[in-house]
Amino acid sequence: MGALLVVGDVRTMDPARPRAGAVGIRGDRIVALGSVDEVRRELGRGRVVEHDAGGFVLPGFVDSHVHVLWAGRAQERVGLDDATSIAEIGHRLLAHDARHPGTGWIEAEAGFDPGDLAEGQLPTATDLDAAVPHRPVLLDRKGHDAIVNTAGLQAAGIDATTPDPPGGRIEHTRDGRPTGLLVEHPAADLARAAIGEPDDARRAGWIETGTRLLRGHGFTGVMDPAVGPGELAAYAAAARSGRLATRVVVMPLGDDHLDDAALQAAVRRSGVAGADPGRLRVGPTKLFLDGGGSLGTAWRSTPWPGTDGYTGNRTLSVEALRTHCRSAAAAGRGVGIHAVGDAAVDLVLDALEEVDRRTPVAGLGFHLIHAYLEPSARAMRRTASLGVALSAHPALWWNAGASVVDRLGEAVAARSNPLRSWIDAGVLVGGGSDGPGPPLSALHGMWQARTRRIRGSEHPVGPGEAITAEEALALFTTRAAAVAGLDGLGRLRVGGPADLAVTDVDPLGPAGPLPGGRVLATVTAGALHVP
């Protein structure tokens, strides 16, 4: 069996041996750490491939919350995340229609907020009609909302008489006509259903593309939240055919209409569990409880300014939340709950305390997702007491923070995404990106967590919530691996998994260079990949 020797400034994240000059790998395991000469001697005679990229050798990065399939799918869609005006959106849609003529749907990634556009507002169906009136168009707003043109509304069967689905809202003009904005999953799903389901082969291609993108950023382990029953089989197919470029934990998506028993039956039918245990495994259930801070739909204890008492969206019923959590805990499994606003976080903790009285939830994989919009100190103490973790997303906060400042003011933003307070409360906090949309780079996430910079701001917002360089690196290595349940990942030690990332910047050095840093090589299960 051949061996691989990786040379560089090695940061192991193992307190017993924090530094080294080289890593020796045989098969998919680390067999030696030490100086270059020591590792060469340990590897002995035989074929040894040496790789010296002249960089910093780190544990392979782990993302505890990234939409892998969506990241691959985004490569086929019209990219509008960086659009600066409604006119520009129209031009891009028109250009795409010219390149890809037909009658089918045009889908686009639309991660912009109203403040990003010159008009200061979102486009309407009428605006989209001006560019593409003859075929349906759907703009996907961060996986939550959708904006569709008139042809899209007609294809989805939405008109002035269509009632709001439970947990969602169809926005209307003053005279009662749909504007094209479909708020939150239940409403957006009316249009998504009209598009139809892609087949497993196409989905498997998106998954392969997504894992390759993430590997290029140094990730060797990721957790994909919100994998629907129809997408599980595609993951199994991708794993069986060797198309996963990273290790993936999938979080099956439950809701009001899909209880735990039905969801687990779908998992069994998909074949995910036995497809490739080294690359693919099933993680906690995923539930969406509320909306988003940048969308103005997170569930808060106080109303959103400028509304008639609107405190945010509750996508999931309280009973479904409790039932899913009870069933998962009884079976020894966890649940990850999307809860952005403080009221949503408190409701999750109420439900978990109830479950915990019968079945302790610590150690089962229960975790809050996001929990960034003004969580209280009491909520943090309750989270720590329950042994519940947090999947937190600095890149998402960099992306969304500006909209929160616009909607709620800088004082609220300064108290939001409080990583320092969460960690000080004793909560296990694992890093992620919530991509696509926010930057996928772990280095960017570390930089944001350390600097508290948000998009469009020249100064830190809430600098007291910044974390240290060591904590930021742990966020995307040991801590993210623990939240994702990827045992052994996140540190380099003899006998451990041969998962490494080599960067041209030092994550433990000054923060400034991190956003521009590059990943020079990634090693996943002993296989070297150089971009």
Image: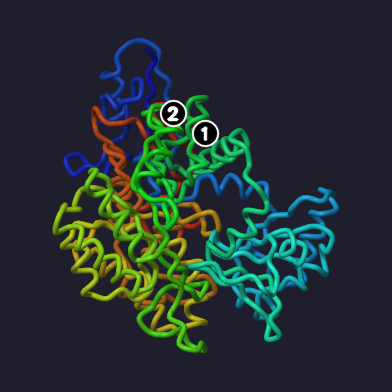
Q: Is residue 101 above or below residue 320?
A: above
For residue 205, which quarter of the picture? top right
- Foreground residue, 1 or 255? 255
Q: Pointers 1 and 2 in contact (CB under 8 A)?
A: yes
Q: Quadrant of the C terminus?
A: top right
Q: Is residue 472 left or right of residue 494?
A: right
Q: Is residue 317 above or below residue 471?
A: below
| Residue type marked 1 | Val
Q: Position of residue 406 (x, y in %)?
A: 52, 82
| Residue type marked 2 | His
Q: Position of residue 92 (x, y in %)?
A: 77, 60
Name the mark on residue 26.
none
For residue 110, which quarter of the picture? bottom right
For residue 354, which quarter of the picture? bottom left
Is residue 388 in sight in this rendering? yes
- The residue that disc 1 covers is 530
Is residue 57 in sight in this rendering? no
- Foreground residue, 208 or 44? 208
What's the CA distance linking mark 1 and mark 2?
A: 10 Å
Q: Is residue 54 left or right of residue 478?
A: right
Q: Position of residue 377 (x, y in %)?
A: 23, 75
Name the mark on residue 51.
2
Q: Position of residue 427 (x, y in %)?
A: 22, 60
Residue depicted at 26% across the width and 56% down the height:
389
Neighbour tally class for label 1: few under 14, some 14-19, many 20 plus, Cα within 10 Å: few
Residue depicted at 50% across the width and 76% down the height:
296
For label 2, the SS is: strand
- Foreground residue, 463 or 422? 422
Q: Earlier in the sequence, mark 1 or mark 2?
A: 2
